[in-house]
Image (cartoon, rainbow, N blue to C red):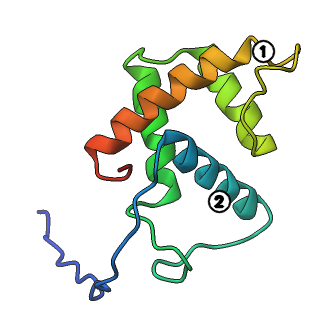
Amino acid sequence: MSTTRKIVLPPSHDVETIPFADGEEAWFWFSRCQRMRQDGARFIAGMVETPRPCAPDDVYRAVMRLYRARQIDNPHLKVLGSYGEKLTPPDEYCREEKEDVPLWQEALLQLGDALKKKGIVE
């Protein structure tokens, strides 16, 4: 026999959130959050200077949803990860990074559109 448990959530804080300008801003925010997590930081809702309309994991889940839907591929994920770690976009004037620019732009366009539908990006 299964029992139903009632889950009581804490009261929500009526804080006005600020959406990201585009997919790139959201991705770099996620990347900074990941770096802080690796350094041992823990995130607590409402304890930030700029309240965002999502959690860092929401950006990650959006990217993985795009990947599973085959809207982005492995090369896109590699470019997102690589430049997310560097916290800088690929430079179109740098010979080594020039071929990454179209992948970067395609991935962030898809991510921006996906996050816009959720109200995370303006």
The circle on residue 26 is none
Asked if disc 2 and disc 1 are in contact, CB closer than 8 Å, the reply is no
Q: In which quadrant of the rendered image does the N terminus lie?
A: bottom left
The residue beneath circle 2 is 33
Q: How many neighbours does mark 2 have within 10 angstroms: few (below 14), some (14-19), or many (20 or more)?
A: some
Left or right side of 38 for 71: left
Q: Quadrant of residue 89?
A: top right
Q: State the residue at coordinates (22%, 78%).
A: 7
Left or right side of 119 for 109: right
Q: How many neighbours does mark 1 have within 10 angstroms: few (below 14), some (14-19), or many (20 or more)?
A: few
Q: Quick one: 18 or 43, which is closer to the camera? A: 18
Q: Quadrant of residue 91?
A: top right
Identify residue type, mark 2: Cys
Task: Please provide percent x and percent y for residue 75.
Answer: 65, 15
Q: State the residue at coordinates (78%, 15%).
A: 98
User: Relative to 20, does residue 23 appear above or below in the rendering?
Assistant: above
Identify residue type, mark 1: Lys
Q: State the residue at coordinates (46%, 77%).
A: 45
User: Relative to 84, does residue 54 appear above or below in the rendering?
Assistant: below
Rounded to the nearest whole Å, what is the CA distance between mark 2 and mark 1? 27 Å
The residue beneath circle 1 is 98
